[in-house]
Image (cartoon, grey):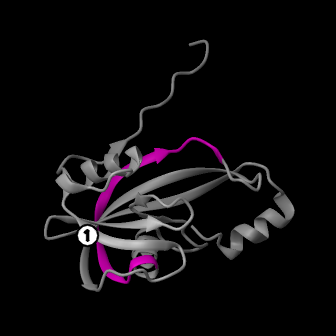
Amino acid sequence: MATPDFIRELRATAGQQLLFLPGISAVVVDDGRVLLHRRADTGRWSIVGGIPEPGEQPAQAAVREVREETGVVCTVERVVGVEGLDPIEYPNGDKCQFMDITLRCHATGGEARVNDDEGLEVGWFAPDALPAGLEDFARHRIRLALADGPTWFAEAAATPGA
């Protein structure tokens, strides 16, 4: 994921301290298949994700990220899950923690292709034929998106000493 300009501006004054940021994950479905892209930064297959820009709604961010990264046009159908992710530290020492909102989206147009420098490959996969090496978090989000259950919320962590 390329670092948005507003994050670079924050880092100029905040340094490498932990930033709590919004994040979106988009599970795009069409004809029973799921859209995945192989990330340039990790080399692994994943669902599309990104950071909303200031003033941008999560659904707008999902649609934008999907189009920017894969060339696919989509609409958002529903919220699939909400989860505060564990803090991460990037190789340069920057620390972030994301509040992820996962959205189920439906493809409405465009052609799946590598559309920016964040991806190496793009493809449609049947849920029973997902690529090897797909992260567990992506598999979990795909299962949630393909089910017709209510929105999933991560359980609260146990309070130390409670």
Residue 104 position, x and y percent, is 29, 62
What residue occupies the far top of the structure in this picture? 161
Which quarter of the rendering shows the C terminus? top right
Residue appearing at x 57%, y 52% in the figure: 98
Q: Main secondary structure of the magenta part?
A: strand
Task: Please tell me whether residue 80 belongs to the stretch shown in magenta.
Answer: yes
Label 1 amino acid?
Trp
What residue occupies the far left of the structure in this picture? 31
Q: Name the residue nearer the viewer: 4 or 153.
A: 4
From the image, tell me which residue sits under label 1. Answer: 124
Up-down relation of residue 140 to residue 155 (above or below): below
Which residues are the magenta region? Answer: 69-88
Left or right side of 9 for 2: left
Element type where label 1 sits in the image: strand
Residue appearing at x 53%, y 44% in the figure: 85
The image quarter in which residue 154 lies? top left
Residue 10 position, x and y percent, is 77, 65
Left or right side of 96 for 83: left
Residue appearing at x 29%, y 53% in the figure: 142
